[in-house]
Image (cartoon, helix red, strand yellow):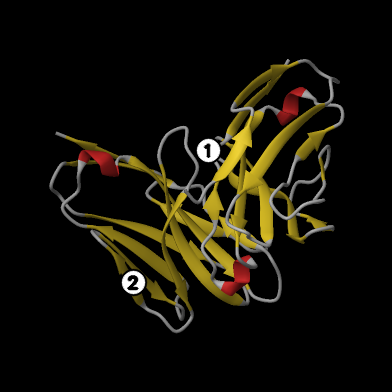
Amino acid sequence: EAQVTQNPRYLITVTGKKLTVTCSQNMNHEYMSWYRQDPGLGLRQIYYSMNVEVTDKGDVPEGYKVSRKEKRNFPLILESPSPNQTSLYFCASSLGRGTDSYEQYFGPGTRLTVT
Amino acid sequence: KNQVEQSPQSLIILEGKNCTLQCNYTVSPFSNLRWYKQDTGRGPVSLTIMTFSENTKSNGRYTATLDADTKQSSLHITASQLSDSASYICVVSAGGGNKLTFGTGTQLKVEL
């Protein structure tokens, strides 16, 4: 089954404790991205990757890191989480860029709470 | 600044009725417009993708329209079902890059 998986689905952590949210897709997609969703703000792009070893900042990259060492995986790293990073996070993948009209597939989401 | 505005913010309708959701955008240059359905606590799922040259696209009971001149789109849901209860998000892509601008969504509730 074609899908995007994220782990963990739920995470409660404390300020400053490094964490990684994993994202994996089995569709051989080149394009992957991370979003956060907050009430009243809609989805905002954090980082995206056009292919292996190619990443770039989205709208809200501060406090986040990503890496793309393999085509299928695109982990999101919070080196020193803060309470304002409490949010619902989604990973997504597609064959190509958003401007190329390829369908984008979203993962199930990771609800992160930073206390 | 690229913006996508959706209306209404929320809507309650009776099962079996039709409804129309609106999306206005100021994204430039326009590349494509997407409608997503997002069930509570789940990731968005694509309903339609329309490019500049398309002015209507259907996916079952969902029909999206696009007027690129007025920069407006609508999503029409026919014969609503309880399972249509969800947030519907309009997303516009700008040409020349990877920028996707998301609306804040319309929360639809279908009641018996």
Disc 1, SS: loop
**Residue B103 left/right relative to B98:** left
Q: CA distance from mark 2 to mark 1?
A: 26 Å
Q: Which residue is mark 1?
A: A108
Q: Considering depth in this image, is A75 or B25 the residue closer to the camera?
A: A75
Chain letter of disc 1? A
How many residues crowd mark 2 within 10 Å: few (<14), some (14–19), many (20+)? some
Q: Give the residue type that dot 2 points to.
A: Lys
Residue at 20 percent across and 44 percent down: it is B81
Vertical placement of residue B96 versus B88, above or below = below
Residue at 50 percent across and 51 percent down: it is A2
Are the residues under marks 2 and 1 on the same chain?
no
Q: Considering depth in this image, is A30 or B44 the residue closer to the camera?
A: A30
Q: Position of residue B44 (x, y in %)?
A: 48, 47
Chain letter of disc 2? B
**Residue A70 left/right relative to A95:** right
Q: Which mark is residue A86?
A: none
Q: Which residue is mark 2?
A: B57
Q: Position of residue A11 (x, y in %)?
A: 66, 21
Res B98 quadrant in image? bottom right
Disc 2, SS: strand
Q: Give the residue type that dot 1 points to.
A: Pro
Q: Considering depth in this image, is A4 or A108 the residue closer to the camera?
A: A4
Q: Position of residue A6 (x, y in %)?
A: 62, 37
Answer whether residue B27 is visible to the viewer in this image.
no
- Quadrant containing the C terminus of chain B is top left
Answer whether residue A21 is visible to the viewer in this image.
yes
**Residue A114 left/right relative to B48:** right
